Amino acid sequence: MYLPGSFSAALTLTILSTVFWGSWANTYKGTKNYAFELFYWDYMAGVVICTFVFALTLGSNGPAGESFIHNVHNADAINIVHSLIAGAIFNVANLLLVAAVDIAGLAVAFPIAIGIAVVEGVVLSYSLQPKGNLTLLICGMVLAIAAVLFDARAYRALRAKMPTSRTGVIVSVISGVLMGGFAPFITRAMTHGSTLTPYSVAALFSVGALLCCFVANTYFMKHPIRGAPVSFSGYWRAGARNHLLGLSGGIAWGVGGCLNFVAAGLVGVPISYAIGQSAPLIAASWGVLVWREFRGAPNRAWVSLGWMFVCYVAAISLIAMAYNH
């Protein structure tokens, strides 16, 4: 299988993973009259397809380690279970995050959910895999959270009169706790006993997420946190364009996930996870540069965006230094 041969290569992969994780939502913006709960089925199919393509190509050829099939066959069963559980946890967290954004807006949902997820995920995964300088890692993590907060402040400046929903805050907290909870399972699967390769973890992670979808997404279709229930009949009437956009979104997330897990094989899950969870900053960049969401925004919004990028670059630098130390 392919693994990065140097820290600089692994760091490049983690940054690319952030770009893909922060970009997949653009595909949903391109859909028309397509409920997110229905879009999500195409999205999950794209994630599964992408991770298995990676596993059967880069994960099965090359000088390092075992091929995908042999690795899954030889790995401890508990590590397979951990990967499946991680995918299921992520799936519920992701659905709740989207619901929280719909209820409370990006300015409330993202800083709460991602802030909790970064702290929890890094701390728990570091306890299982203490790789890198803890002080520098914490400083980088704090700056990453600050960047997300500046991002939220910029969006809040656009919608200064929007009330904060208590339900949205609660859903954001639950999403953040779950989002941070999948990282330790990934760490365990890649570091204890007969381990799984990053490609195997990514593929099994996607299977766990898809299986969970039949329970969680079906439930949210019938009992949405906000809005009217959605039936499967709308999925078949969605049209080829909407389905292709959904698959493309899933493939984008799958590429990001594979790159992040592969990088974690060298730098460790705490570092790759901390960088990867800066994805909202990439999403904000799309909003500024492509979707023109900040057209006519007040000066304080642009100042907050500037500080967001400064904190993000500083966070990446400190997290990189944490590995080298």
Image (cartoon, rainbow, N blue to C red):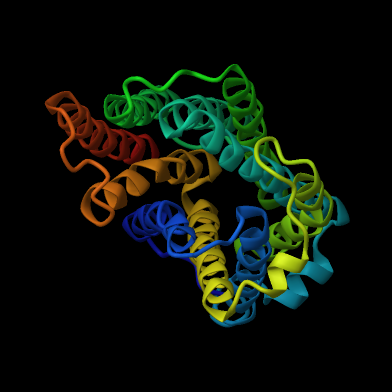
Quadrant position of the C terminus in the picture: top left
What percent of the width, then of the height, locates residue 247? 57, 71
Q: Point out the residue furthest to the left here.
A: 299
Q: Quadrant of residue 302?
A: top left
| Residue located at (82% from left, 67% from top) | 74
Q: Is residue 265 left or right of residue 151?
A: right
Quadrant position of the N terminus in the picture: bottom right
Q: Can residue 192 be seen in this view?
A: no
Closer to us: 214 or 15: 214
Closer to us: 294 or 78: 294
Q: In this view, does 184 lie to the left or right of 151?
A: right
| Residue located at (58% from left, 38% from top) | 97
Image: 253 above or below 300? below
Image: 236 above or below 136? below
What percent of the width, then of the height, locates residue 169? 57, 21
Q: Point out the residue furthest to the right here.
A: 77
Q: Is residue 220 visible?
A: yes
Image: 247 above or below 91? below
Q: Is residue 90 left or right of residue 215?
A: left
What percent of the width, then of the height, locates residue 72? 78, 68
| Residue located at (70% from left, 44% from top) | 228
Closer to us: 89 or 247: 247
Q: Is residue 248 left or right of residue 59?
A: left
